[in-house]
Amino acid sequence: MIDFLPAASSEEAVRHFAARLSFETDVSDVADDLGGDAIVVVDARGTRSWKQGHIPGALHLPTPEIAARAASRIPDGRTVVVYCWGPACNGATRAALEFAKLGYPVKEMIGGFEYWAREGLPVDTVPGTVTRRSPDPLTAPISAVSCDC
């Protein structure tokens, strides 16, 4: 039997969860912020993955190219939101680290491209944009635009 660990104090919990929200965002929040001037979304995957599908409006900047190309691609005053394939991939974490080393404010989009697509959000592909599709009912609400959280 595994011993149950008590919850952290409320003060520790506030620090922990506030810190997480300063480092991470989710696909619904990114979808809401697209088109504004607060964020720039960066796809850190390779070219073949990018061509297979990506978030509309995202910049393609693979992690190995961030140091050399970020200054010419990222507008001043924007928070960079990075993504890779999905939760089982740490590519977005690596990309976020590269942006942080360069002094950019940065967040990781949790769930990655997998959850963007699974929630039925639009996807750009080589032939064109695939508009909203039915979300995977195991990962997103089927009767609402978002989880309302």
Image (spheres, helix red, strand yellow):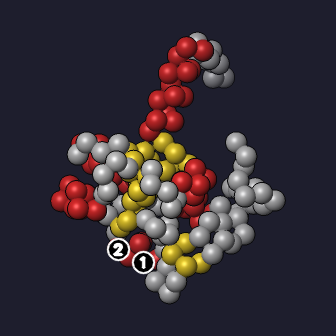
For residue 51, which numbered disc appears in the image? 1
> For the point 35% across and 74% down, which residue is it?
47
Query: Looking at numbered disc 1 in the image, what kind of residue is underneath it?
Result: Lys
> For the point 81% across and 59% down, which residue is it?
143
Q: CA distance from mark 1 to mark 2?
A: 6 Å
For residue 146, which numbered disc appears in the image? none
Q: Are marks 1 and 2 in contact (CB under 8 Å)?
A: yes
Question: Would you say residue 90 is visible in this rendering?
Answer: no
Pick the residue in front: 88 or 38: 38
Residue 140 in the figure: left or right of residue 41: right
In the rendering, at what x and y percent does residue 11 appear?
Answer: 55, 14
In the rendering, at what x and y percent does residue 87 appear?
Answer: 51, 52
Question: Would you say residue 24 is visible in this rendering?
Answer: yes
Question: Which of the 4 quarters of the picture holds residue 136?
Answer: bottom right
Q: Quadrant of the C terminus?
A: top right
Looking at the image, is 74 positioned above or below residue 149? below
In the rendering, at what x and y percent does residue 49 appear?
Answer: 42, 72
Q: Quadrant of the N terminus?
A: top right
Q: Secondary structure at mark 1?
A: helix
> For the point 41% across and 72% down, which residue is it?
50
Q: Secondary structure at mark 2?
A: helix
Query: Looking at numbered disc 2 in the image, what kind of residue is underneath it?
Result: Thr
Q: Which residue is mark 2?
A: 47
Looking at the image, is 123 positioned above or below residue 29? below
> For the point 55% across and 79% down, which residue is it?
129
